Image (cartoon, helix red, strand yellow):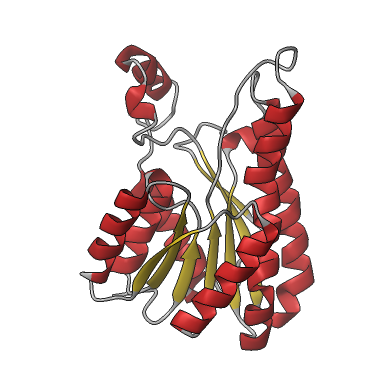
């Protein structure tokens, strides 16, 4: 059963990691996928080809969600190319970790801009199309760090906590038009980035998680499928922790 048949989704930051996993699972569920990437042209072209081979329409766009005008242009291009925007997944994000004592103003501003301002930019960009359709699902990627904080990540935690407040406000504003806004807070997800860490470090993180393993991009993607599909038609303004029990 394909839960997303005929729906068009925009996924930001999807050339690798969690974003790529979401794009693959969405296409497998019948969704047409417009995804963005910043610099990995080759990886984006490969993903586009892979998704199209699943029998859906897929297209990669080199676009910076942190730039207001680029977000507007992207939404217009996707609407023209795909005919609708049913789902928005704000996944693009960066880290620039440091203790507050050492963090530079530039590193604080950059993380807020890429992680939080991009969510504002993209939500504003798709809002008109969703209002016209009188339906839509917005899914914003926060983090367990946005829920509980983390030493050495004041900028990242602030950006991810900001996403939660923003999403709940959007849920209140747009609910009457059948537009839903929810948040996913992933825990320790194993991707190419974590693959560069020492195995003993990764294992100690796994041991501290109640389910005794790191998450996969698919674990996050499956929850996205639920929130994007009509199965969650009465769910809005929620934060779902996909963390193996880390915050329990």
Q: Residue at x 38, y 73 (%)?
A: 31
Up the image or down, 209 lies above or below 90; here it is above
Residue 168's image quarter? bottom right
Q: Which residue is drawn at 62% across and 63% down?
A: 71
On the question of residue 240 being in view, the answer is yes
x and y percentages locating residue 95 in the rendered image = 57, 32
Residue 203's image quarter? top left
197 with respect to 64 (left or right): left
Q: In which quarter of the image is the C terminus?
A: top right
In front of the other: 199 or 209: 199
Up the image or down, 104 lies above or below 66; here it is above
On the question of residue 84 being in view, the answer is no
Q: Which residue lies furthest to the left in this view?
A: 53
Q: Which residue is drawn at 72% across and 21% down?
A: 104
In front of the other: 214 or 212: 214
x and y percentages locating residue 230 in the rendered image = 49, 76
54 with respect to 206 (left or right): left
Q: Which residue is drawn at 60% across and 27% down?
A: 96
In front of the other: 84 or 218: 84
Up the image or down, 99 lies above or below 150; here it is above
x and y percentages locating residue 155 in the rendered image = 69, 30
x and y percentages locating residue 233 in the rendered image = 56, 74
């Amino acid at each position: 059963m394909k839960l997303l048949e005929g729906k068009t989704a925009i996924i930001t930051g999807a050339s690798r990691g969690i974003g790529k996993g979401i794009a693959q699972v969405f296409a497998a569920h019948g969704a047409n996928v417009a995804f963005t990437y910043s610099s990995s042209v080759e990886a984006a072209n490969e993903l586009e080809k892979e998704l199209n081979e699943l029998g859906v329409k897929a297209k990669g766009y080199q676009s910076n969600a942190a730039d207001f005008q680029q977000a507007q242009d992207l939404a217009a291009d996707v609407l023209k190319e795909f005919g609708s925007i049913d789902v928005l997944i704000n996944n693009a994000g960066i880290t620039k970790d440091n203790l507050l004592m050492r963090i530079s103003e530039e590193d604080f501003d950059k993380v807020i801009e890429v992680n939080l301002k991009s969510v504002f930019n993209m939500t504003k960009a798709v809002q008109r199309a969703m209002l016209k359709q009188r339906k839509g699902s917005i899914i914003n990627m926060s983090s367990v760090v946005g829920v509980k904080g983390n030493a050495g990540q004041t900028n990242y935690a602030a950006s991810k906590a900001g996403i939660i407040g923003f999403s709940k406000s959007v849920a209140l504003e747009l609910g009457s038009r059948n537009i839903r806004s929810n948040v996913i807070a992933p825990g320790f997800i194993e991707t190419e980035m974590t693959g560069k860490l020492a195995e003993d470090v990764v294992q100690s993180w796994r041991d501290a998680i109640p389910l005794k393993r790191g998450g996969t991009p698919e674990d996050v993607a499956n929850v996205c499928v639920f929130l994007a599909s009509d199965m969650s038609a009465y769910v809005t303004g929620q934060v779902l922790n996909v963390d193996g029990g880390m915050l329990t």
